[in-house]
Amino acid sequence: MRSPDFRTREAAYKALFEVYKKNSGVLGEIYQNVVIQWRDEAISMRGYKSPISVRNISNDLDDETVEALLQVCRKNSSVFQDYFKEKAKMLGMKKLRRYDLYAPLSTKASDSKSFTFGKAVSTVLDTFGNFDSEFRSLAERVFSERHVDSEIRKAKRGGAFCYTVSPKITPYVLLNFDGKTRDVSTLAHEFGHAIHSMLASEMPVMVSHAPLPLAETASVFAEMLFNERMAEKMSPKARRLLLAEQIDDMYATIMRQAYFTLFEVDAHKAIGEQNATIDAVAKMYMDNLKEQFGTSVAIGPEFEWEWIYIPHFYHTPFYTYAYSFGNLLVLSLYQQYKREGKSFVPKYLKILSAGGSRKPEDLLIEAGIDISKPEFWQQGFDYVQGMIQQLKSLAPK
Ligand SMILES: [Zn+2]
């Protein structure tokens, strides 16, 4: 899917969905039963207003907040559509196909190994230090206690994460550091998690963890601090690539995830209230994609089976909007930081220090942020739109 060769990308998607299509009878029936059981328990037995309310309550969010978020995402589908048209140009294509969504934009700039681990650590620490001295010293503690496993070894698990054993113990960070700019950005991300956790360590153990929608408040923010620092030193060409990669990621965390939840809302209604067939659900998913992409992307017919391979739909229904929530929230907080400068820092640290002890609506309103209002979520999209404008302005003449 991320191959530089357009034929390979197409073949990869087709090979994948062919198998899911072949097994759609069994998988679709599993899904129908998940939905029916979820509904029975949520509505008939426990009296929730709607199937999604169950998830909202476990996220400590009001239904109205989530509804505002989803509707604003829906209203802004054209923002990323605009980006996909630009991405087609960058790839030298007339129109993007769904197969090309994650096509790499460069094989050089961002992929080259330009950082030693020492350089990466000092760059991230300096970035944090510029933001706030406590931010830096907390990150330093993780290193000085030797809680970081960064090297790539045979048989070591891939990816990266931060794990907090208990509020009293400095978190552990796992990385697979390979010297790419992206690895440094990941380092900043995971250390954001560690700092968040250390700031909330005074909270009782049961509520020290931030709820899911707030879980990325420090990590994505830390990444943005790093990316901005990198962009300052880059040539226009490299900056254009970095921007495009960031927008790619934002699409995948904001819009794609919101549309997943919008699909689930429809699917739970159709299966739960009208016994919709598996084919009808597949058609519904295709309509969802068409709304999401408009005319900006050509969608192959096999994508009607994409929903059937999304694990969250089976094991944690309505989970994915939390990704959109977290990312848009950070975009807004970041803009607020840009506007207010240093006076923003104590407000932000206070939000992080609360961990999971308070309801997001109540916690954020103290920093002047009203997440129940569509206007708040719109700001995040305005920011993305600004990035796309900048991307276009950096195009070679
Ligand atoms: Zn994270």
Image (spheres, helix red, strand yellow):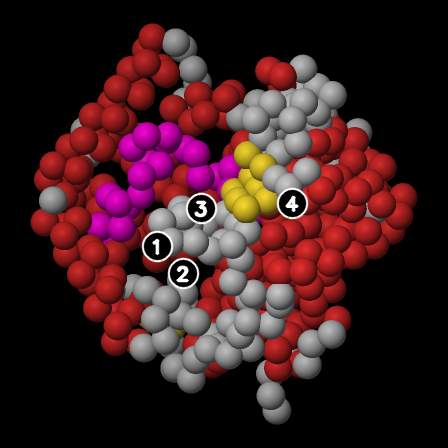
Q: Position of residue 228 (x, y in %)?
A: 71, 63
233 sits left or right of 28 in the view: right
**226 or 255: nearer the viewer:** 226
The dot on residue 397 is none
**260 or 220: nearer the viewer:** 220
Give the residue at x 82% y 51%: 129
Is the distance from the Cβ of mark 2 to the nearest ligand 1 atom less than 8 Å?
Answer: no
Whether residue 201 is in magenta: the answer is: no
Query: Which mark is nearer the camera, 1 or 4?
Result: 4
Q: CA distance from mark 1 to mark 4?
A: 35 Å
Residue 380 in sight in this render? no
Residue that badge 3 annotates: 257
User: Residue 94 falls in which quadrant of the image?
Assistant: bottom left
Q: Earlier in the sequence, mark 4 or mark 3?
A: 4
Mark 3 crowdedness (10 Å alpha carbons): few <14, some 14-19, many ≥20:
many
Residue 351 in sight in this render? yes
Q: Earlier in the sequence, mark 3 or mark 2?
A: 3
Is the distance from the Cβ of mark 3 to the nearest ligand 1 atom less than 8 Å?
Answer: no
Q: CA distance from mark 4 to mark 3?
A: 24 Å
Establish if 288 lies above or below 325: below
Residue that badge 4 annotates: 191
Q: CA distance from mark 3 to mark 1?
A: 12 Å
Q: Which residues are magenta?
A: 304-329
Q: CA distance from mark 3 to mark 2?
A: 13 Å
Query: Which mark is nearer the camera, 3 or 2?
Result: 3
Establish if 259 lies above or below 38: below
